[in-house]
């Protein structure tokens, strides 16, 4: 699949997001910063990525997810937990970087900060009904099938 991409910061021209291995699901997004950015404990800031994408097809969306290493080892996750990029969004991809750890963390310019996953999307329509056809689960939820 080919996605239109705009390079908004010249530094991104030779380091567009890429799959790190043939089996990678995520494209690493870089922090397009002019200077290091220190996030104090529990601080968050919107970080530009230097690129815009236009998915065009409403059958796709992109998700911005944390990088596991940064999230687990340094507490750098996302202020919105997950970023959802609509297929008609044409602005710069932004990463809400949140330092959920008790230690300050410095993001270096052009460091890989988060990852982008392209996913298929179904746009559903609602069919209003008074009763659903019976299902095995019915209205049971929240542990209703037991623990083991
Ligand atoms: O981490 C993110 C999340 C969103 N976006 C961009 C793409 C997305 O299509 C747009 C709107 O995001 P969303 O719909 O999640 O935010 P909203 O608060 O509902 O804003 P809007 O009223 O613009 O839809 O912002 C990002 O760049 N990074
Ligand atoms: Mg929205």
Image (cartoon, rainbow, N blue to C red):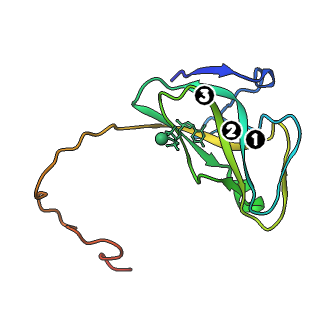
Instruction: Report which quarter residue 14 is drawn in.
Output: top right
Between 143 and 148, the residue placed more toward the observer is 143
Which residue in the structure is indicated by mark 2? 28
Which mark's residue is nearer the viewer, 2 or 3?
Answer: 3
Point out the residue furthest to the right here: 35
Visible residue check, residue 24: no
> Callout 2 environment at 10 Å: few (<14), some (14 to 19), or many (20+)?
many
Give the CA distance from mark 2 to mark 1.
6 Å
Instruction: In the rendered structure, find residue 138 and report the number of the disc placed on it.
Output: none
Asked if marks 2 and 1 touch (Cβ < 8 Å), the reply is: yes
Which type of secondary structure does the marked residue at label 3 adopt?
loop
Q: Is mark 3 within 8 Å of ligand 1?
A: yes
Q: Earlier in the sequence, mark 1 or mark 3?
A: 3
Q: Earlier in the sequence, mark 2 or mark 1?
A: 2
Q: Is residue 4 left or right of residue 137?
A: right
Which type of secondary structure does the marked residue at label 2 adopt?
strand
Residue in view at x 55 percent, y 22 percent: 3
Which mark's residue is nearer the viewer, 1 or 3?
Answer: 3
Residue in view at x 67 percent, y 31 percent: 18
Which residue in the structure is indicated by mark 1? 112
Residue 21, position in %: x, y?
A: 66, 37
Which residue in the structure is indicated by mark 3? 91
Visible residue check, residue 83: yes
Residue 139, position in %: x, y?
A: 22, 69
Between 19 and 120, the residue placed more toward the observer is 120
Q: Is mark 1 within 8 Å of ligand 1?
A: no
Give the CA distance from mark 1 to mark 3.
20 Å
Give the CA distance from mark 2 to mark 3.
18 Å
Residue in view at x 75 percent, y 41 percent: 112
Q: Is residue 44 left or right of residue 39?
A: left
């Amino acid at each position: 699949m080919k996605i239109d991409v705009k390079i908004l910061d010249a530094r991104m021209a030779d380091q567009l997001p890429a799959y790190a291995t043939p089996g990678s699901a995520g494209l690493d997004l870089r922090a397009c910063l002019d200077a290091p950015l220190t996030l104090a404990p529990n601080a968050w800031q919107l970080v530009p990525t230097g690129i815009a994408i236009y998915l065009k097809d409403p059958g796709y969306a992109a998700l911005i997810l944390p990088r596991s290493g940064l999230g687990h080892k340094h507490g750098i996750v996302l202020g919105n937990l997950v970023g959802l990029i609509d297929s008609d969004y044409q602005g710069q991809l932004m990463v809400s970087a949140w330092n959920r750890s008790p230690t300050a963390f410095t993001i270096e310019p052009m460091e890989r900060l988060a990852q982008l996953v392209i996913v298929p999307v179904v746009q559903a329509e609602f069919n209003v009904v008074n009763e659903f056809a019976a299902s095995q689960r019915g209205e049971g939820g929240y542990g209703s099938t037991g623990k083991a």
